[in-house]
């Protein structure tokens, strides 16, 4: 049974039980205890006993599915519990079938491992290249660069270089040309050209290390070059990221404000002075009072409506420099 079916049948039996109890009271048996009328053989007592037994069975099913602290009705999703194998022989048969399936997978895996052992290693040590075979055979990095150029990728983007290297390697494996790259060549093909220009092999794209500058314009310690504005902003940003300033409490802020006000009296004067507000013209107040008298007392937003009407009726010179104004 589903959760909805259990809830529906339980509710129906509860209603039937209430009606049966009303019949028991109408028959003049309202003072009987459950232990008395449940043991009797009259039709009314038998109906009550069967109804209560079915209600107990349904409530037990609710507790079995939900667990401790179950509600009066099953929530949605508490369907029938899957039946386990009832006998030991059925459980043993299921375990034997699972074991046979695992052994088949193991045999297939061992067969694949044997086939892989028979194949030559993919990353075999490549022979040392000479100037002759360098000119005759294209290197793996050159093939990766050619693939990047043909497909419109970025030679300095690591993800594009990795994708191109994988594609070229798969093409070489499918072609079975026997010239798969060594691990060193594969890693070298992943380096961007900007990195090679700074740390590459001498004679190819750059030098292993940048050349040292030994020429000096004068003796002694050379003065440091000042940072540009952009470089100073970047340095300040990362300096704050590496060493963030401690968060100030409210007492620290008040103490710093008092020190600043004691140092510069003009700062305190700006905070203590009253805000400058332009006064409303007298004529506008007269218009407001006239419009307020036209609106019935008790009207919602009476003051706001009167002010709006007064501003709409007033000439421009009557209006202040803020607040309501007509275009």
Image (spheres, helix red, strand yellow):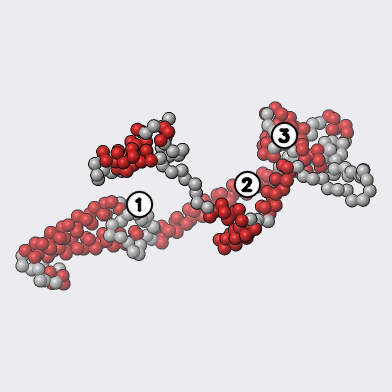
Which residue is label 3 attached to?
A: 155
Residue 71: image x %, image y %?
A: 30, 60
Does residue 277 appear left or right of residue 2 in this picture?
right
Do residues under tags 1 and 3 come within 8 Å of each other at their CB atoms?
no
Which residue is label 1 attached to?
A: 77
Say which of 183 and 208 sits in front. 208
The structure residue drawn at horizontal position 19% and vertical position 57%, both measured from the top left corner, is 13
> For the residue labelled by badge 1, is the local secondary structure a helix, a strand or a loop?
loop
Do residues under tags 3 and 2 come within 8 Å of each other at their CB atoms?
no
- Chain-order first, disc 3 or disc 2: 2
Rendered image: mark on residue 111: 2
The 10 Å Cα crowd at callout 3, few under 14, some 14 to 19, many 20 or more, is many
The structure residue drawn at horizontal position 28% and vertical position 51%, both measured from the top left corner, is 4
In the picture shown, does residue 163 fall above or below 66?
above
Task: Tell which residue pokes out farthest to the right in this image.
Answer: 219
Give the CA separation, mark 1 to mark 2: 45 Å
Does residue 268 appear in this view?
A: yes
Residue 84: image x %, image y %?
A: 39, 57
The structure residue drawn at horizontal position 32% and vertical position 54%, both measured from the top left corner, is 75
Please tell me in which quadrant of the rendered image residue 168 appears: top right
The structure residue drawn at horizontal position 66% and vertical position 52%, both measured from the top left corner, is 241
Residue 171: image x %, image y %?
A: 69, 33
Please tell me in which quadrant of the rendered image residue 319 appears: top left
């Amino acid at each position: 049974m589903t959760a909805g079916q259990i809830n529906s049948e339980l509710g129906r039996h509860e209603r039937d039980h209430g009606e049966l109890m009303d019949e028991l009271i109408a028959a003049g048996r309202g003072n009987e205890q459950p232990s008395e009328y449940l043991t009797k053989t009259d039709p009314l007592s038998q109906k009550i006993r069967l109804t209560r037994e079915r209600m107990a069975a349904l409530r037990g099913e609710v507790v079995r599915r939900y667990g401790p602290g179950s509600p009066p009705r099953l929530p949605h999703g508490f369907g029938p519990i899957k039946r386990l194998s009832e006998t030991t022989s059925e459980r043993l048969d299921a375990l034997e079938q699972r074991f046979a399936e695992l052994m088949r997978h193991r045999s297939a895996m061992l067969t694949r491992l044997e086939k892989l052992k028979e194949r030559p290693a993919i990353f075999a040590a490549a022979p040392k290249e000479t100037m002759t075979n360098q000119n005759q055979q294209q290197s793996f990095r050159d093939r990766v660069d050619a693939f990047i150029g043909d497909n419109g990728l970025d030679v300095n983007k690591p993800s594009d270089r990795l994708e191109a290297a994988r594609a070229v390697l798969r093409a070489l494996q499918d072609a079975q040309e026997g010239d798969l790259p060594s691990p060193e060549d594969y890693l070298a093909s992943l380096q961007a050209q900007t990195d090679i220009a700074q740390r590459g092999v001498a004679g190819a794209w750059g030098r292993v290390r940048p050349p040292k500058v030994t020429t000096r314009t004068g003796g002694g310690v050379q003065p440091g070059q000042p940072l540009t504005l952009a470089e100073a902003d970047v340095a300040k940003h990362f300096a704050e990221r590496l060493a963030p300033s401690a968060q100030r409490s409210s007492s620290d802020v008040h103490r710093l404000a008092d020190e600043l006000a004691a140092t510069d009296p003009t700062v305190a004067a700006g905070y203590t002075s009253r805000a400058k507000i332009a006064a409303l013209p007298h004529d506008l107040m007269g218009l407001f009072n006239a419009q307020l008298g036209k609106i019935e007392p008790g009207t919602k937003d009476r003051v706001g409506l009167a002010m709006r009407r007064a501003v709409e009726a007033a000439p421009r010179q009557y209006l202040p420099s803020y607040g309501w104004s007509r275009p």
